[in-house]
Amino acid sequence: MSVAGQTFTKTADWLDWHPAPVKPTFALPEGAVDAHCHVFGPGEEFPFAPQRKYTPCDASKQQLFDLRDHLGFSRNVVVQATCHGADNSAMVDVLNNAQGLARGVATITEDISDEELQALHQAGVRGVRFNFVKRLVDALPFDSLERIAHRIKSLDWHIVIYFESQDLPELYDFFTSLPTTVVVDHMGRPDVTKPVDGEEFKLFLKLMAENENFWSKVSCPERISVAGPSKQYQDVVPFARAVVENFPDRVLWGTDWPHPNMKSHMPDDGELVNMIPLFAPTAELQQKLLVDNPMRLYWSE
Ligand code: 0GY
């Protein structure tokens, strides 16, 4: 594909998303929200950022809407993917074409104007993402992130943070200084070969327990699992279940479609939905995880 002379050849060993996920046997509650997914391009319409760390396959808004309907979700929260940098136009294009059924999480830099922030809000953006995963981004300095945090607080937005568990100790004090609701991607990427009641995951549970402004997505078993798909990602279940049962009013769930950077295999999104009752075993917990919590965070106005 090419845009104004640029070509977008996907990164070697990049896997395309699953072309035909099963219809889930787990029936989602009415009004369920897929609270973590992305779109990629299409590159011809929405070019990828020059500073990106990978070039993905295309994954368009219509393909996202088709997946939503196939799986039985009602709404999406579209998180800006790092391959688009701070150009939010592909994500905003989803929001503008979703008839109110999608909200967004943007990536911004300090030079954004108040008018641009207002336009993102009008489109349905309700948060910004701070990414600390070194293979994905060159992280912004803390003081810049602090200034962004204070600006978006006035819009009543939240901050989504993405980091890996080994980096939590050094980031802990910065995270707890943030002035807004903070949503952790994928439970802080726990190392599931370590015990669920071990020191490393205890620090994450402490972060959640001692800071009521912290939420967690119980997402991405396919990324976190060491056991893998042949073992149905069972090694992730105790971690997700601990988070849901301890913090039932501050958890979200998402497919993570189209699954950036999955190198070993591509998950079947229908099978990911079928894992939800293992994470949230009662109808009450499922209602909070899939409907009440995301609606409160993203559709309160
Ligand atoms: C995720 C995870 C990843 C990538 C991104 O924006 C992104 O590029 O989020 C990853 O590579 O772990 O949440 O989709």
Image: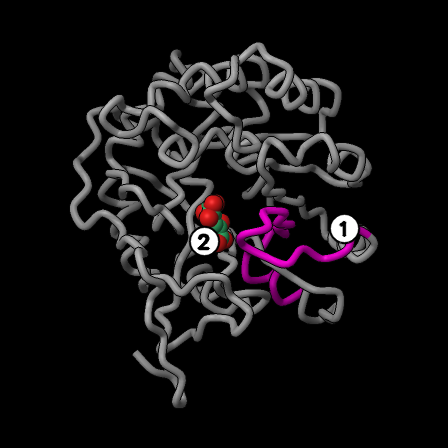
Query: What amino acid type is highlighted by mark number 1?
Result: Ala
Element on which disc 1 rests: helix
* CB under 8 Å between discs 2 and 1: no
Q: Residue 109: where, in percent of width, then height?
A: 70, 64
Q: Is residue 28 left or right of residue 213?
A: left
Mark 1 lies on residue = 149
Q: Quadrant of the N terminus?
A: bottom left
Q: Residue 57: where, in percent of width, then height?
A: 31, 62
Dot 1 alpha-carbon crowd within 10 angstroms: few under 14, some 14 to 19, many 20 or more = many
Q: Is residue 25 left or right of residue 127?
A: left
Q: Is residue 120 magenta?
A: yes
Residue at 38 percent across and 34 percent down: it is 32
What colour-coding does the image apply? one colour
The stretch in magenta equals 118-142
Circle number at residue 100: 2
Residue 8 shows in the view: yes
The front one of 58 and 27 is 58
Residue at 83 percent across and 54 percent down: it is 143
Q: Is residue 231 above or below residue 130?
A: above
Circle number at residue 264: none
Q: Is residue 286 left or right of residue 89?
A: left
Residue at 59 percent across and 57 percent down: it is 137
Q: CA distance from mark 2 to mark 1?
A: 25 Å
Query: What amino acid type is highlighted by mark number 2?
Result: Gly
Q: Is residue 24 magenta?
A: no
Q: Residue 12: where, in percent of width, then height?
A: 32, 61
